[in-house]
Image (tube, helix red, strand yellow):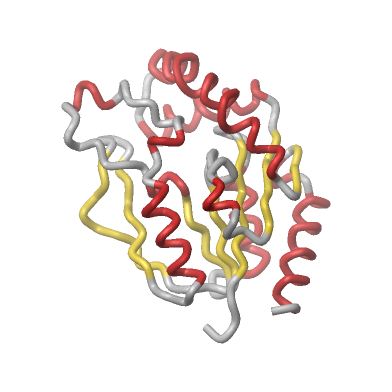
Amino acid sequence: MSLSPILIGIAGGTGSGKTSIAKKLLEEYGNGDVVVIEQDAYYRDISNIPMEDRHLHNFDHPDAIDIEFFNKQLISLIKGQIVEVPIYDFSTHSRLKDTKTVHPHRVIIVEGILTLHYTILRELMDIKVFVDTPNDIRFIRRISRDIDKRNRTVESVIDQYLKTVRPMHEQFVEPSKYFADIIIPEGSKNRVAIDLIRTKINSILNNK
């Protein structure tokens, strides 16, 4: 690539609408210009832990993410190199042998609850976004997603939310909001915020 790409970080609590924002921007620019990298792909492989104990792991703590590998691959993409992004299997809490080949793009969107928590990631970002959604709405979305897409029971989702999701949100995710350049209420339904991000992206691209 002749020009350096720009990196956009999108953070927010579980069920806040981060993915919807990323998809909206993808629609705005198209697959040829924008690529979305999900933080969830970089969960540490815990296949060494007995299957019956893996659900006890705290997946909402910053240590659950292989941040060194995550950072390394983002730097490679910024340098115009192709990377093999891991594929994480939530049913077994382990990385698959297969990977996803990602080519360099003009705009790289990094999406995940903790993307603004890590200093080394923030230092790479041109734009930092936090999606701020009421707790009750996020909780309802979390239950619906985990039951429909991850084959979880209502009881297990509630138990995990109370034990790790909520306290980790208060300790690590919510404070990262103060590193954001843009805070978006209402997620992808906030058209003004989407237009603002697009304008900022265009401004940076035009100056590179």
Q: Quadrant of the C terminus?
A: bottom right
Q: Is residue 170 left or right of residue 94?
A: right
Front residue of this view, candidates 69 and 94: 69
Residue 106 appears in which quarter of the rendering? bottom right
Residue pushed farthest bottom?
A: 2
The residue at 57%/60% (across/down) is 124
Front residue of this view, candidates 7 and 136: 7
Residue pushed farthest right?
A: 192
Residue 132 coordinates in the image, percent (x, y): 70, 35
Front residue of this view, candidates 68 and 47: 68
Q: Is residue 127 left or right of residue 36?
A: right
The residue at 79%/58% (across/down) is 195
Does 42 sit above or below residue 55?
below
Residue 11 coordinates in the image, percent (x, y): 60, 43
Does 70 sit above or below residue 32?
above
Residue 69 coordinates in the image, percent (x, y): 37, 54
The residue at 48%/32% (across/down) is 145
Q: Is residue 6 left or right of residue 88?
A: right
